[in-house]
Amino acid sequence: MIEGLSHLTFIVRDLDKMETVLATVLDAQKIYDSGAETFSLSQERFFKVGGLWVAIMQGAPLQEKTYNHVAFKMGPDEYDDRLARIKSLGLQIKEGRPRVDGEGHSIYFYDHDNHLFELHSGTLEQRLQRYSSR
């Protein structure tokens, strides 16, 4: 039986740069660093982000940017602060898609390795309710 999400893993060229992104934008707390050891495929670090285990491993970055993304939940009053954090790191912000009023706000941004992240303030229930009222 599937109980939920175990963890997310991102392959990155520079562990330090990605750690800065995770800590600055997502308030990640580092809980493990393999250092020079390679118990898995390469050097790795583990973080907690909103109770979720996020792993980063050193390796070749994604070759291109796509809309495949991971969305993290933020509070509706956090938009300006999170956007400022992303901008302070010089990360590329992707223009959001058109939205229906009431489905929440989003910030999309790419990390240094072409992973797309979304910070979203809405819920699935809000989105479904809004879509069904159209």
Image (cartoon, helix red, strand yellow):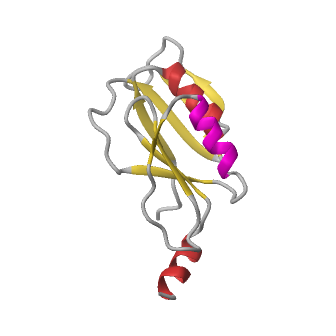
Image point 57% across, 28% down: which residue? 89
Q: Residue furthest top?
A: 36
Residue 39, image x, y percentages? 45, 22
Assess whether residue 83 is covered by the magenta stretch. Answer: yes
Image point 36% across, 50% down: which residue? 68
Q: Residue furthest bottom?
A: 133
Residue 67, image x, y percentages? 35, 51
Image point 67% across, 48% down: which residue? 80
Q: Main secondary structure of the magenta part?
A: helix
Residues in magenta, as a range: 79-88
Residue 54, image x, y percentages? 54, 39
Residue 128, image x, y percentages? 51, 79
- Give above or below for 53 relative to 74: above
Residue nearer the viewer, 73 or 49:
73
**Residue 47 visible here:** no
Image point 57% across, 42% down: which residue? 53
Assess whether residue 132 is covered by the magenta stretch. Answer: no
**Residue 76 visible here:** yes
Q: Is residue 95 left or right of residue 76?
A: left
- Give above or below for 6 relative to 38: below
Identify the image quadrant of residue 126.
bottom right
Residue nearer the viewer, 3 or 57:
57
